[in-house]
Image: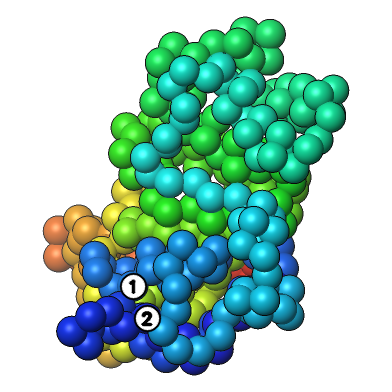
Amino acid sequence: MIRFDHVSKQYAGGRFAVQSLNLQIHDGEFFVLIGPSGCGKTTTLKMINRLIDLSEGTVWVNDKKISDYDIDELRWNIGYVLQQIALFPHMTIAENIAVVPELRHWDKRRIAARVDELLTMVGLEPSVYRNRKPRELSGGQQQRVGVIRALAADPEILLMDEPFSALDPFSREKLQDDLLEIQQKLKKTIVFVTHDMQEAMKLGDRIGLMKGGELVQVGTPHEFLTDPANDFVREFVGGYKFTVNLKELVHPVQTAAAETKMIPLDTPFDEVLEHLSRFEQLCVEEDGHPIGIINRQHVLSYMSQYLRVGGQRNE
């Protein structure tokens, strides 16, 4: 679906934002780009729809170079969602959603049906919200409209650049769940940029971790957790905060092998993940006494509601 072939972006002064990037994103895949600030993830995203021109290499969409597409044809087939929602303030919600379908000369009845279909999909009753203005909606509701506006003309690809990062935690989690439901129904190819490892773990079929304009590792959440490519990946995944009571993971045993790593019951979960990237199993102790073991499988089973293994979300 989307392929980067030795793609680089170099700015004046010789600084590379992205350097010799090779990546293939599959049809219908939810692919998450993550990494520290300035790593090149947003630049990578924007090169797909030619908001940023590449300096070297080739980006392909459906086996066609993006440079061979008419720019309108390319962008009409690629929905785009930003952190800054950018709804037109003087237009109604229905008018905002209808922008691209109107540019593509859809008839009015088809547009109206599409608006109602999409509003219903994200839990906004059309009769209530169709004629409202953006200022009458909450931040979370506005971002829902931003997502469905990007889907209005039924594009094959959806680009999302940190779309939920400005929202409060409750709204953010709800929108993540909504997006997963939409993806299960529509099976779009989604490229999603975030700096939040928990969000990446929850949403991504696969994750691409970037550093200094280069891809450090590409894999499923399961692979990032159990087989980090290097210390940078291990430390980045170790920052993934997940609240858990270790007692819920412990499997009681009479004795543990002498070489088993010992950890106290109150060990923070990010440290548990770091240990499990190095050791097959851990022995948990309370008040100096072993109470049982945990291993990678125990942790993965517990986290299955968040992890996507082999492209499938376990619930």
Q: Position of residue 245 (x, y in %)?
A: 33, 49
Cα distance in 3D space between marks 1 and 2? 9 Å
Q: Nearer the viewer, residue 288 or 138?
A: 138
- Residue 58: percent from the left, percent from the top? 56, 85
Report x, y in % for residue 190. Answer: 60, 58
Q: Nearer the viewer, residue 146 or 182?
A: 146
- The residue pinned by badge 2 equals 9
Residue in the picture at 60% in, 11% down: 131
Closer to the chain start, of discs 1 and 2, is 2
**Label 2 CA crowd tier, 10 Å (few <14, some 14–19, many 20+):** many
Residue 306 visible, this angle: no
- The three-letter code of the residue at mark 2 reads Lys
Tell me the residue at 54%/11% (across/down). Answer: 132
Which residue is situated farthest in the top direction here? 128
Circles 1, 2 touching at the beta carbon (< 8 Å): yes
Instruction: Give the number of the disc on residue 40.
Output: 1
Above or below for 191 versus 171: below
Is residue 56 visible in the rendered image? The answer is yes
Residue 271 in the figure: left or right of residue 123? left
Question: The residue tagged with tag 2: helix, strand or loop?
Answer: strand
Compared with residue 88, is residue 278 higher up or lower down, i.e. above or below?
A: below
Q: How is the image coloured?
A: rainbow
Q: Nearer the viewer, residue 261 or 240?
A: 240
Which amino acid type is marked by label 1?
A: Gly
Image side of residue 116 versus residue 9, left or right = right
Q: Is residue 213 above or below residue 250?
A: below
